[in-house]
Image: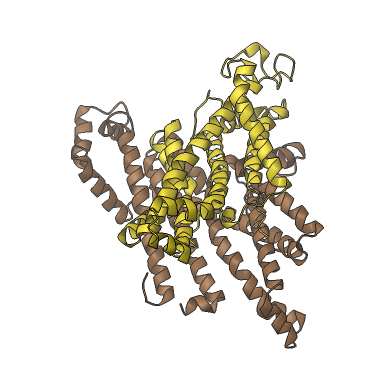
Amino acid sequence: MTSAHPLFSAFLQRGLQALIVAVIVGVVSFTMMQALPGDAAYRIAAGRYGYDMMDAAAAETVRNELGLNQHWSIQLISWLSALAQFDLGRSLVYGTPVVDEIATQLGYSLLLAGGAVLISIIIAVPVGVVAGLKPGGAIDRLTLGVSILLRAIPSFALGVVLVLVFAVQMRLLPVAGFRGLEHLILPSLTLGLGLAAVSNRVVRDSVVEALGSEWRLFSRTKGLSARRTATRHILRNASLPVVTYVGVQMAYLIEGVVIVEAVFAWPGIGHALVHAIFNRDIAMVQGTALTLGLIYVLLNLFIDVACRLIDPRMRSQ
Amino acid sequence: MTDQSPTALTATVAHSRIKPGYPRIIGLLLLALLIFCALIGPDLIGVDPVKQQLLEARQSPSAEHLLGTDHLGRDMAARLLSGSQLSLSLAFLSVLTAGLPGTALGVLAAWRGGWTDRLLTNISDAILALPGLLLVLMLAAISPGSWWALYVGISLTLWVEYFRYTRQRARIVLAEPAVEASRLLGFSPRLIILRHLAPEIGPGLLTIAAFGAATAMTAVAALGFISVGVRPPTAEWGVMMAELLPYWREAPFLILQPVFCLVLTVLALHLSVGGMQRK
């Protein structure tokens, strides 16, 4: 798009993406607010003063104060401008500032996501490398079969099956909630297995490609040891598609966090989002969806930068 | 945004060619069987999937109830089949409403270039700005429990995949000397699209369609399971899983039935286009 420094243009693109996320989330939340049944002024007045203390006059005050009597387009603009000033409002159910709620939940979600990525790396990298060393071999075919099967199991169904096996039948691990690190194992295993199901094949493919390449043959021919070829050439070349693919997985990770948190009652952002949708707590819906969307943009930015660090060709583009 | 802008919904495999082989044949047969069951099954069983018979709750499979009954005495076989109708029809419809415009717009963007191309690419990038399921979730939240919101949300997130693939391939194909020759010979755009383009992008589009259908089914079930999708008492696999979860101890075979159905259908769809085999 631009001819500026490639790193700068990456920041610019992701900044634009963040803006789009904010506008989409803002407009959808606003539409939800409008689509709620009943008079918004009465609802907010009831939330503020209690159902017994509320009357038509109180509703009228709220209506004037919040500009609810204006045309919807003007309301939308003021809604979005509040969003632009990072004013996320208060939870309609709990009355607490949305920002405070999210600050607590964010830690839990990051913990879960981190655990999931760690588990997926621990599984995918060794399995992928071993399968890739002998393409078409028994291990390769076996891991392919398992990957296809695992990929067909949606994260929440996998979660249910893992709970039934480990928590309920074998009584090894807690079922849901969060009261210690052992509660982290099942949710992050659920997510991690889903991630590993595909990423082990990506590792495998890039190992196969690196091993069959001409530059590997050349560096061996010119006298580099197998070990040095691996560390100097294969590792860097093979890691590029993997890192690019991690970017693709970020969407899966964010989606997975929402679903898996809801399944395991994990006190993170995804759980809060689902809960807020269920309770029609629109301020919370907007805050949590916005946070998840922005995290997604941020993760993609990291991937952009990582790719440029690994591949010098992308730096000089 | 970049050409690597990710979408999790139909990850990776879109660009591979479909190869013949046992997995594909098994997948296609399985898929045909599942569609056949969904089409004629409910009539064959002839039991209302939402009819409660509390005295017959949580029964084991019998001649009367082939797969037993759930916690409200509803016939499991009837519910599973009704659920498969819902899932398959939604998947099929969303593949159509996402695939046809997505492909057409992809060809249009590649053909016209210029501002048409820029506009369409920007729109598709805007949709990719959010993870797909998040968008579906938000749209479903506008009108909770409605089948339409799910359908529109899923179609809206899935068309981008067709658009991006078609645009990318069509730009390459349309620049080929053979296409230029056809143009110079005065052949119509229709012929160029059918003869030159369609054989190039057909297999890739099929792969996207199969994975997209699987994604649509998974999304519906996931949202049903966390009670923000289709509402009970509708027989939907995700809703059924949520309903039957509390009874795992007394009747584990009940909760495993919808799980099995969903996994089997998704697996059949994945296998029918060759799974994730690449090389």
Taking the image as shown, residue B103 lies to the left or right of residue B255, namely left
Taking the image as shown, residue A90 lies to the left or right of residue B274, namely left
| Furthest residue toward right | A138
Q: Quadrant of residue B147?
A: top left
Residue B28: image location, x then y, percent: 66, 40
Residue A171, visible in the rendered structure: yes
Q: Quadrant of residue A49?
A: top left
Residue B3: image location, x then y, percent: 47, 63
Residue B69: image location, x then y, percent: 67, 19
Report the residue at 19% width, 30% height from top: A57
| Furthest residue toward front | B185
Report the residue at 66% width, 42% height from top: B267
- Location of the C terminus of chain B by quadrant is bottom right
Q: Is residue B113 above or below residue B139?
A: below
Q: Is residue B18 above or below residue B147?
A: below
Residue A175, visible in the rendered structure: no
- Location of the N terminus of chain B by quadrant is bottom left
Chain B colour? yellow
Q: Nearer the viewer, residue A106 or A245?
A: A245
- The chain coloured brown is A
Q: Is residue B70 above or below residue A210?
A: above
Q: How is the image coloured?
A: by chain
Q: Is residue B240 above or below residue A221?
A: above
Residue A40: image location, x then y, percent: 28, 34
| Furthest residue toward bottom | A222
Q: Nearer the viewer, residue A316 or B191?
A: B191
Report the residue at 72% width, 26% height from top: B251
Taking the image as shown, residue B100 lies to the left or right of residue B237, namely left
